[in-house]
């Protein structure tokens, strides 16, 4: 019985000791995704300005 427990203990210790191998880890280069805008960021300013001009024209017409 002692030999069986001792063998089990050595087996558990031997398998827990190997967490990997001695080779260099393979590290992949990070993927960089760059979003390309179809138009400049100034294009987003025109819609609120046009709406403001329309509202101002409606208020001035009254």
Image: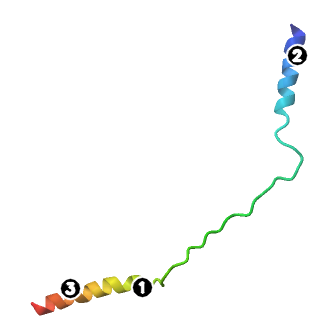
Q: Which of marks 1 and 3 is nearer the N terminus?
A: 1
Q: Which residue is drawn at 90% across and 11% down?
A: 3
Mark 2 and mark 3: Cα distance apart in space: 88 Å
Q: Which residue is drawn at 33% across and 83% down?
A: 47
> So how many labels did they put on this image?
3
For disc 2, the neighbor class at 10 Å (few under 14, some 14 to 19, many from 20) is few
Q: x and y percent of residue 31 in the render?
A: 67, 65
State left or right for residue 13 relative to residue 56.
right
Residue 54 sits above or below residue 36 on the image: below
Asked whether the residues under the numbered discs 1 and 3 touch, taking CB atoms below 8 Å apart as contact, a structural biologist would say no
Q: Residue at x 51, y 79 (%)?
A: 37
Looking at the rendered image, the disc whose residue lies closer to the viewer, 2 or 1, is 1
Q: Which residue is drawn at 36% across and 86% down?
A: 46
Examine the image and state in which quarter residue 57 appears: bottom left
Residue 59 sits above or below residue 32 on the image: below
The label shown at residue 6 is: 2
Examine the image and state in which quarter residue 5 appears: top right
Q: Which of marks 2 and 3 is nearer the N terminus?
A: 2
Image quadrant where one finds the N terminus: top right
Badge 3 is on which residue?
55
State left or right for residue 57 relative to residue 37.
left
Asked whether the residues under the numbered discs 2 and 3 touch, taking CB atoms below 8 Å apart as contact, a structural biologist would say no
Looking at the rendered image, the disc whose residue lies closer to the viewer, 2 or 3, is 3
Q: Which residue lies furthest to the top in this view?
A: 1
The label shown at residue 43 is: 1
For disc 3, the neighbor class at 10 Å (few under 14, some 14 to 19, many from 20) is few
Q: Which of marks 2 and 1 is nearer the N terminus?
A: 2
**Residue at disc 3, secondary structure:** helix
Q: x and y percent of residue 6 in the render?
A: 88, 16
């Amino acid at each position: 019985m002692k030999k069986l427990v001792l063998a089990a203990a050595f087996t558990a210790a031997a398998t827990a000791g190997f967490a990997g191998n001695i080779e260099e880890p393979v590290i992949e280069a990070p993927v960089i995704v760059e979003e390309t805008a179809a138009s400049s960021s100034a294009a987003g300013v025109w819609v609120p300005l046009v709406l403001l001009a329309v509202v101002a024209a409606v208020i001035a017409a009254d």
